[in-house]
């Protein structure tokens, strides 16, 4: 429990910064929605000139793009990108920092099992991700209500926002698994950015919306906002795939960390 609270304190500053960054981006996008809505016909005509592949990459649905939910879903992919970087960075660093900060040997000499170490750090990181999402959801909903030009289904708004947590959970668990797989991880940022942007570009280039199988290769494409708006639900195959990735990554983390040789960095 002491490790849990210690981790919460150490993660507090970065959590505040990432949450503020996502809120600021959402506020920026939502602030221009009233002008988009006032010129809905022209905006839709402009976007209709884009190739279908480009519209699919950007998450543009011409049927709903001028509604608040449609416009928000188009911009949400960039908010999810920020959230994924936060989660990936958190996952890669939460266990590996003991080695980088030369405290691994000291920690393991205490009467604490490796399983308890992983559990405490997992729970602390997940707590911060949950807090991030609660604050983001509340503030984003407040901004949406300020700029709306007509009523919208708040339930769908929160369903879209919930996918941010799903994406973060996937990248967090991938990150923490990588942190125990890579022998000597001295720098977190290159790994975090490389993995996140790699999956982002894979999703943008391969998952154009016409190839459902290609979408499995990028967590960013597991949750289609247009589908959520139209069907008030998530696509089961991709939801299950995300859950499998999370479970396997966490299981791998426990198994590898339990047997891994841990040495303080020299």
Image: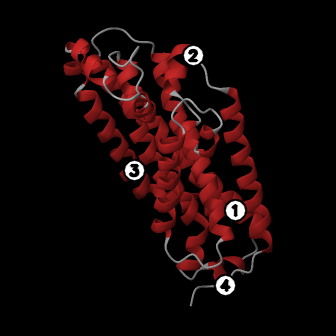
Nearest the viewer among 128 and 259 is 259
Whole-number angstrom distance, CA of label 4 to CA of label 2: 50 Å
Instruction: Give percent across and percent down for residue 123.
Output: 64, 52
Q: Residue furthest top?
A: 150
Instruction: Give percent across and percent down for residue 110.
Output: 72, 77
Side of 192 where 105 appears, left or right: right
| Residue 2 at least partly seen | no
Compare marks 4 and 2 and give the one earlier in the sequence: 2
Q: Are marks 4 and 2 in contact (CB under 8 Å)?
A: no
Label 2 crowding class (10 Å Cα cut-off): few <14, some 14-19, many 20+? some
Q: Which mark is residue 263?
A: 4
**Residue at left offset 53%, top offset 30%:** 209
Q: Secondary structure at mark 1?
A: helix
Q: Which mark is residue 232?
A: 2
**Residue at left offset 62%, top offset 85%:** 264
Whole-number angstrom distance, CA of label 3 to CA of label 2: 28 Å
Nearest the viewer among 115 and 40 is 40
Q: Which mark is residue 18?
A: 3
Nearest the viewer among 262 and 25 is 25
Is label 2 or label 1 in front? Answer: 2
Compare marks 3 and 2 and give the one earlier in the sequence: 3
Compare marks 1 and 3 and give the one earlier in the sequence: 3
Looking at the picture, does residue 121 appear above or below residue 64?
below
Split into 4 quadrants, where in the image is the N terminus?
A: bottom right
Split into 4 quadrants, where in the image is the C terminus?
A: bottom right
Q: Secondary structure at mark 4?
A: loop
Q: Which mark is residue 118?
A: 1
* Quadrant hosting residue 237: top right
């Amino acid at each position: 429990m002491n490790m849990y609270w210690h981790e919460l304190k150490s993660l507090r500053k970065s959590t505040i910064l990432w949450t503020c960054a996502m809120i600021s981006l959402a506020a920026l996008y939502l602030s221009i929605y009233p002008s988009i809505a006032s010129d809905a016909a022209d905006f839709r005509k402009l976007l209709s000139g884009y190739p279908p592949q480009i519209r699919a990459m950007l998450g543009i649905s011409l049927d709903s793009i001028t509604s608040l939910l449609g416009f928000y879903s188009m911009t949400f992919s960039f908010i999810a990108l920020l959230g994924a970087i936060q989660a990936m960075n958190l996952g890669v660093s939460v266990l590996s920092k003991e080695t980088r900060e030369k405290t691994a040997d000291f920690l393991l000499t205490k009467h604490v099992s490796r399983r308890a170490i992983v559990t405490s750090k997992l729970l602390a990181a997940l707590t911060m991700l949950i807090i991030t999402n609660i604050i983001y959801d509340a503030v984003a909903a407040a901004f949406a209500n300020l700029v709306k030009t007509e009523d919208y289904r708040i339930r769908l708004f929160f369903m879209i926002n919930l996918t941010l947590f799903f994406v973060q959970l996937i990248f967090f668990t991938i990150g923490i698994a990588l942190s125990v797989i890579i022998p000597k991880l001295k720098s977190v940022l290159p790994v975090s950015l490389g993995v996140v942007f790699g999956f982002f570009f894979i999703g943008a280039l391969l998952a154009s919306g016409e190839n459902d199988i290609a979408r499995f290769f990028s967590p960013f494409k597991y949750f289609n906002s247009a589908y959520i708006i139209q069907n008030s639900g998530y696509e089961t195959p991709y939801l299950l795939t995300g859950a499998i990735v999370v479970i396997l990554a966490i299981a791998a983390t426990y198994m590898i960390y339990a047997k891994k040789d841990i040495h303080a960095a020299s």
